[in-house]
Amino acid sequence: MTITKSTRYLILAATATASLSVCYAMKVAVTGTTGRLGRQAIQLLSSNGVQTRCLLRHPIDASIYPSIEKDASSSQVASYLSKLRGVSMVEGDATNAASCKELIEGCDAVLSLHGPVRPPPLQSLFCLLPESDPKHSRSVNYLAVQNLIDAVKDSETCKRIVRVTGKGESPTQIFTVLINMLGNMAKAWNYEGEQLLRTSGVDYTIVRPGVMGKDDIPTNKVLALADNGGDLKVTPVTHSQIASLCVKCLLYPNAAKSTLTAMNVEEGTGEESYGPLLAEVESDTRDFPTSLVSEHKKAARNGAAILAAVMAVLLSGTVAVVKFFGGVVIGLASR
């Protein structure tokens, strides 16, 4: 008997609904606690009664006023989140293997929502930060993912990793080049981190979102997913949308070992929620490139060379203009 898409959706939706009580009985670990995405996911988990363990680099400061507002400091956000129902904080860093092992103790899944702090542009352009530095994108987007994989493999309970990355399979794409040039090769190491998951044997869901940051975008039936790392036009998405997707992934066993591109489409042409989309997701089947770090680095070097050439032309033009007008002024003054 052939199972139609609609029948398959009904079966999976029923499975997901039956899994709700299981999800609420879960304990979920989160990295990237005070980031825009992490805080949204933690609030969503807490509001649904899910026990949540959050990795935090610094201890809670009792003297800090708790706040979740956009302009709140990371310390204020941490203080606010720590007071939510079912939320506990674990002091440590994802780049530290022992911290990751402590974080996921007793957990069933981990939402890997951390990312590198944006570095000073010149620091990245001139490669002033060693790749071994804990703040470098290699440490944050690659080594930290390996730490989580190792911790999950050693765990008796944790069986799933949901990792948020970004589109990065086209090293020469202009925005990828710019992000690599100005972000210590963030795109390059994000992809390498994805590959660690794909070859780990651990159940993973990789989420490649659009551009997160804008909140004033259409939200009525705009959600779209492409599994197998499929291509969708890059669009703005909200942190709350992607947080919801990460949490809902845990309800769909068929979303394990999948790479999901998450974008928004024209209002009214997408889905209202991720449920129907997740019900159709299938595990990765295509062969992803084993590694792209060399191609990313080459494209970034070429981009830096082009930028240097453009700056040299602009500078020489500026010098020529200054000399011209300087000569004019001197000529007029000597009359």
Image: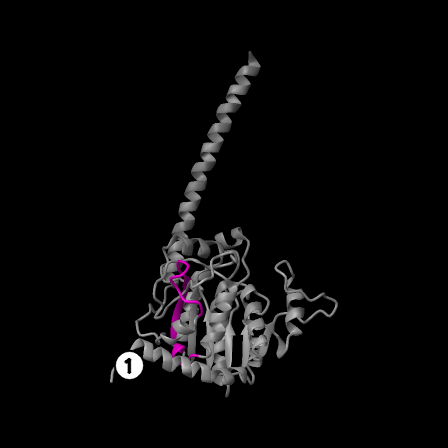
Residue drawn at 43 percent across, 49 percent down: 304
Can residue 265 be seen here? The reply is yes
Q: Which one is nearer the viewer's eye here, 9 or 226?
A: 9
| In this rendering, position of residue 153 left or right of residue 48 | left
Q: Position of residue 275 (x, y in %)?
A: 43, 74
> Residue 71, how many percent across, how many down?
63, 58
The residue at 34%/63% (across/down) is 231
Q: Residues within 10 Å of mark 1 (few under 14, many from 20)?
A: few
The image's colouring method is one colour
Does any portion of residue 97 appear in the rendered image? no
**Left of 130 or right of it: where is 72?**
right
Asked if 308 appears above or below 248 in the picture, the reply is above
Identify the residue at horizontal 50%, vertical 62% (top origin).
238
Please state, as top left, top right, bottom left or bottom right, where the N terminus lies in the image.
bottom left
Q: Position of residue 134 (x, y in %)?
A: 55, 66
Q: Which residue is mark 1?
A: 3
Q: Quadrant of residue 258?
A: bottom left
Q: Nearer the viewer, residue 55 or 162?
A: 162
Q: Which span of residues is magenta-colored?
A: 252-273
Q: Residue furthest bottom?
A: 156
Foreground residue among 110 and 192: 110
Residue 152 location in percent, x, y? Answer: 49, 81
